[in-house]
Each structure stands twice: as C-alpha cells, then as structure tokens.
Image (cartoon, helix red, strand yellow):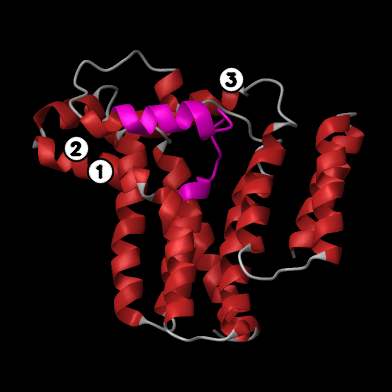
Amino acid sequence: MAAAYFAYLTGIAVVRRRSRPAVLSLAVLAALFTIGMPSVMPLVYLLAGYWLPAMLVREPSGLLERRLLGVDYALFGANGLERFERGAPRILIEYLELAYLLCYAVVPAGFALLILAGYGDATLDRFWSVVLLASFICYGLLPWLPSRAPRAIEPPSRARRSSIRRLNLAVLDRASVQWNTFPSGHTAASLATALAVGAHMPMAGVVLGVVALSIAVGSVVGRYHYAADAIVAAAVAVLVFVMAIAARGL
C-alpha cells in the first residue's frame, strides 16, 4: 500500500516534470523495499507522504476555495464562527486550540499504547495499514485539490483569545507544507488511530476518539481547516476502518 502511494506520487512528479519530488519519492520507494516497515519507520513514511504531495502544487484552486468557504458559510453563517468564538468561554477556546495541537501526538500515542499493551507485529501492521491508508488518501488528493487554509483567506478575526493559538501558528509556520489538505489529514489520521486502537483497547479508543473529534472541531473553529475537510476526513477514516475489518479483521 505504501509502495503504491509513493509510486503514484512519482508518476505525478514525472508527468508534471518536477524532478525533486520524483527523486525523493523514488528514494522513499527504495527505502520501503530495502528497510521495510520496522519499528517506527511507518511514522517516517507518514511524514514523507505528507510533505511530498505539496511539492507538486504550484497554486491554489480558487474555485475549490470558494466552494469550501461556501459550505462553511451555509453551515455557520458568514461570521458565525467568529461570533461563536467571541461568545464561548475562553477555557473552551483554549481546549479546542490545545486539541488541534495534539494532532501531532495522536498517531505515535496510539502506536505506543499498542506496544505497551503487548500487542505483536500482526496487530501493529494492521494498525499502520488503517492509519497510513486514511492519511494517504487525504494527502494524495492535494495535487488535484490544492487550497489554502481558511485563516489565510478570511480577514483576521478580532475575537482570537487563545494563548495556545500562538504556539499552533508557530508550529504551522515551521512544520506545515502551507497548503490545506482536503480531506483533512489531521482529522483522518487521528480518527483512524482511535478506531484502530479501540478495536483492541476500547477505553483507550474512546479517549483517543474524543481527542480526534476535538481536533476536528478545533481545526474548523480555529480556521485551520474548512468544515468539509473535517467531515469528509472523518468519513474516510471510518470507511478505511470498515474496509480493514471486512478484509482481514482487526
């Protein structure tokens, strides 16, 4: 599955005559066939799968951005989310910002929980199959559906009251590809992790599920993602999980 994904990215890079992402994708393919998937290597492939598609994007799709914003405005109103943030308790806004910050920790946390609980290679392999497939679906669509995050399009909100937001923005400035993924890779990966862990550790799955849903809500309220990003990403994670169960069980 991972090999197919990076071969797909290589093909796009060759067709679009982008030499750097083509070489890097081939390098990851070589690593897959020489190193394989030991230990934490799937985390490396997950990061590579996030960064490489962004190298294939030149400019955003204005039509897609307008449609995504249109969905937001249809759901919340033109200034609905700003009004919500202005009127909501600050502790709730801080929680949603913190939840979004945790999106980077959910996948390794789920992996660590399974290891600490003593699950073997077969279970870990199935865990990574669910998480990587859900994530790669989202990341792999970026070359075809490029857009900017809503915070980059909408006027700055005067209602921002979160100190954690400054940390989120600093992390995004330094570690993000600066493109919006539709569907949201953060939401898909987090929810896929919760479902894959919950299949073996129900209570841990519930906790991770609450975090994943909080990440989805926080990403929309904080304007890191559009509502459609989070909704479709959640559907992708559930679909991949169901497919995994149908294919060979968790």
Q: Which class describes the residues within 10 Å of circle 1: few (<14), some (14-19), or many (20+)?
A: many
Q: In this view, does 95 lie to the left or right of 104?
A: left
Q: Which residue is at the front of the view, 25 or 241?
A: 25
Which residue is tagged 2? Answer: 93
Residue 197 horizontal/vertical position (percent): 44, 75
Q: Which class describes the residues within 10 Å of circle 3: few (<14), some (14-19), or many (20+)?
A: few
Residue 190 horizontal/vertical position (percent): 44, 58
Q: Do the residues labelled 3 and 1 touch (CB within 8 Å)?
A: no
Choose mark 3 or mark 1, whichever is in front: 1
Give, as a single range, the part of the protein colored magenta.
Answer: 166-186
Residue at image position (88%, 44%) is 11
Which residue is tagged 1? Answer: 96
Q: Which residue is at the front of the view, 165 or 157?
A: 165
In which quadrant of the rendered view does residue 147 lie?
top right
Residue at image position (48%, 60%) is 107
Residue at image position (44%, 68%) is 110
The numbered dot on residue 62 is 3
Task: Please tell me which of labels 3 and 1 falls first in the chain.
Answer: 3
Residue 65 horizontal/vertical position (percent): 52, 25
Q: Do the residues labelled 1 and 2 touch (CB within 8 Å)?
A: yes
Q: In this view, does 147 lie above or below 246?
A: above
Residue 28 horizontal/vertical position (percent): 80, 52
